[in-house]
């Protein structure tokens, strides 16, 4: 469903320029993210951050880690930016950008971890290339992830999960951990997204894996 645009959002976002980076205004962040934070530490990135419940909770729990949430819809990222500002999370930035342009905003090896949470499954075969776990996206992730960097992926959609595991294996990713029913297992420090809470309440199993590119 296409969201109805709110004309006032653009101006409202201007008050959060210390948190928000916009793709059409600022491209000098590539290779300089740690300078923006004025801090050292691992850099963890979420693609499709939505309203920001996951990334803000992660930033609050792990103040020694630098977090970036990427979202392509201005009206949606506004909610994430507000959350970050209200919680005064100095280790979090939000990037308003298309994930397809990831390599324009991150230098090779700059990222230590990538989160992909409940992305659009694009169920039709002809739309497979749009899935964020398709080989064409994995090639971009490989470029921006550090040598020991990894991908953490969660979805309620079993066909997408099976497809993703196959794509990971075919593109040189080693599966470190795999779960087909996350909430029935003792996984430490799991932070739920908005979709995860919704689907879990309905009894839908949550699929999760951690993967790393082989050396």
Image: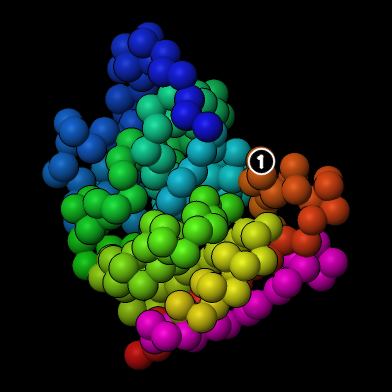
Of residue 74 and residue 212, the one placed in the foreground of this image is 74
Q: Residue furthest top?
A: 8
Residue 138 image-quadrant placement? bottom left
Q: Please state, as top left, top right, bottom left or bottom right, where the C terminus lies in the image.
A: bottom left
Where does label 1 land, which residue? 194
* Left or right position of 127 against 165: left
Where in the figure is residue 1, as x and y percent of width and height?
52, 32
Crowding near the residue tagged with mark 1, few <14, some 14–19, many ≥20 C-alpha atoms within 10 Å: some
Give the magenta part as a residue range.
169-189
The question of residue 196 being in magenta is answered with no
Of residue 130 and residue 155, the one placed in the foreground of this image is 130
In the displayed structure, 137 sits above or below 47; it is: below
Dot 1: element: helix
Residue 73 image-quadrant placement? top left
Where in the figure is residue 74, as x and y percent of width and height?
38, 27
Q: Residue furthest bottom?
A: 215
Q: Is residue 28 visible?
A: yes
Q: Is residue 32 visible?
A: no
In the displayed structure, 93 sits above or below 123; it is: above
For image coordinates 30% across by 40% down, the residue present is 97
For image coordinates 60% across by 74% down, the residue present is 162
For image coordinates 23% across by 37% down, the residue present is 23
The question of residue 175 being in magenta is answered with yes
Of residue 181 and residue 158, the one placed in the foreground of this image is 158
Where in the figure is residue 69, as x and y percent of width and height?
43, 44
* Left or right position of 201 against 84: right
Residue 176 image-quadrant placement? bottom right
> How has the structure been colored for display?
rainbow
């Amino acid at each position: 469903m296409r969201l109805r645009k709110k004309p006032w959002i653009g101006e409202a976002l201007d008050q959060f320029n210390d948190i928000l980076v916009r793709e059409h205004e600022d491209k000098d962040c590539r290779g300089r993210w740690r300078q923006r934070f004025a801090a050292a530490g691992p850099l963890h990135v979420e693609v499709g951050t939505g309203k920001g419940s996951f990334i803000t909770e992660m930033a609050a729990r792990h103040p020694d880690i630098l977090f970036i949430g990427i979202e392509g819809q201005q009206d949606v990222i506004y909610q994430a930016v507000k959350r970050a500002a209200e919680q005064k999370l100095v280790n979090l930035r939000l990037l308003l950008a298309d994930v397809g342009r990831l390599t324009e905003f991150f230098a090779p090896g700059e990222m230590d971890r990538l989160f992909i949470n409940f992305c659009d499954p694009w169920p039709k075969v002809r739309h497979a290339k749009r899935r964020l776990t398709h080989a064409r996206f994995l090639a971009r992730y490989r470029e921006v992830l550090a040598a020991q960097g990894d991908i953490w992926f969660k979805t309620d959609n079993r066909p997408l999960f099976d497809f993703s595991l196959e794509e990971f294996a075919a593109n040189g990713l080693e599966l470190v951990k795999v779960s087909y029913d996350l909430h029935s297992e003792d996984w430490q420090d799991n932070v739920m997204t908005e979709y995860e809470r919704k689907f879990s309440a309905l009894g839908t199993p949550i699929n999760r894996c951690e993967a790393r590119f082989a050396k």
